Image (cartoon, rainbow, N blue to C red):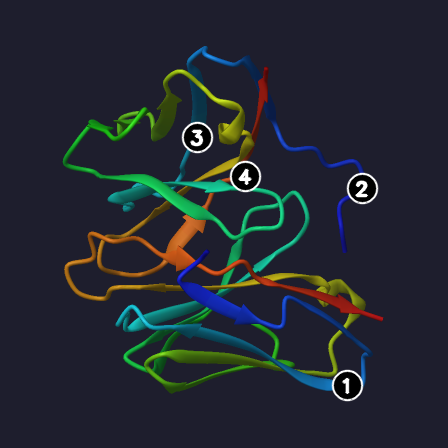
Amino acid sequence: GESVGLHLPTLSVQEGDNSIINCAYSNSASDYFIWYKQESGKGPQFIIDIRSNMDKRQGQRVTVLLNKTVKHLSLQIAATQPGDSAVYFCADGRYNFNKFYFGSGTKLNVKP
Amino acid sequence: DTEVTQTPKHLVMGMTNKKSLKCEQHMGHRAMYWYKQKAKKPPELMFVYSYEKLSINESVPSRFSPECPNSSLLNLHLHALQPEDSALYLCASSQLRDSNQPQHFGDGTRLSIL
């Protein structure tokens, strides 16, 4: 059943500030990492991905950093906008293996 | 609008009912997935189909029965569900070879078991 009182970790930022969302993964064999954004009532939406042969990848207003030594992933959002308010999930898996595990998620609140 | 279409958007059913969830994509993806998502939790993988064949079953109870009639369609047949099966059921698809593209998700079917 549902967990009573379970809350997602929440990050509140001011509009225009930069946001950093963190994620830890546990599987040392994972070599492919994805960040998803999930808005209320919608399915997860792809933001950016990175393979384990890289430690940084940039997209439009987003940057993903990968630290394989400590199994840590972060998503940086520049100039955060109200439309960025959502739950953000990281997922890790094996490239070309089509099986991914999602992290617990972080809720981003952007204050106008 | 998502490129993965799921129907119905909402479904309420009793524990003795039989119903099916449907998923459709026309992106030419040859991998399709079912996930279950409870409130405030991440999606949990249930099944993976590769080239219309079941390749991964994450120890899902037999009251959930997936089916992939062709490369564009994925069904999830439901029978004798329990109240704890109430959740958002998400379908996704992806390329299989040289997978630079990650999964594309539908907006899900919100299932309530009475």
Residue designated by label 2: A4
Q: Position of residue B43 (x, y in %)?
A: 53, 53
- Mark 2 is on which residue type? Val
Q: Are marks 1 and 4 on the same chain?
A: no
Whether residue B59 is visible: no
- Mark 4 is on which residue type? Ser
Residue designated by label 1: B17
Q: Position of residue A32 (x, y in %)?
A: 26, 45
Quadrant where the C terminus of chain A is found in the figure = top right
Answer yes or no: do the residues labelled 4 and 2 have beta carbons within 8 Å? Answer: no
Quadrant where the N terminus of chain A is found in the figure = bottom right
Horizontal relation, residue A77 to residue A55: left or right? right
Q: CA distance from mark 2 to mark 3?
A: 23 Å
- Residue at the image point whose x is 22% and y is 59% from the top: A96
Horizontal relation, residue A64 to residue A111: left or right? left
Answer yes or no: do the residues labelled 2 and 1 have beta carbons within 8 Å? Answer: no
Within-10-Å neighbours for mark 1: few <14, some 14–19, many 20+: few
Given the image, what chain letter belongs to the residue carrying mark 1? B
Residue designated by label 4: A104
Q: CA distance from mark 4 to mark 2?
A: 16 Å
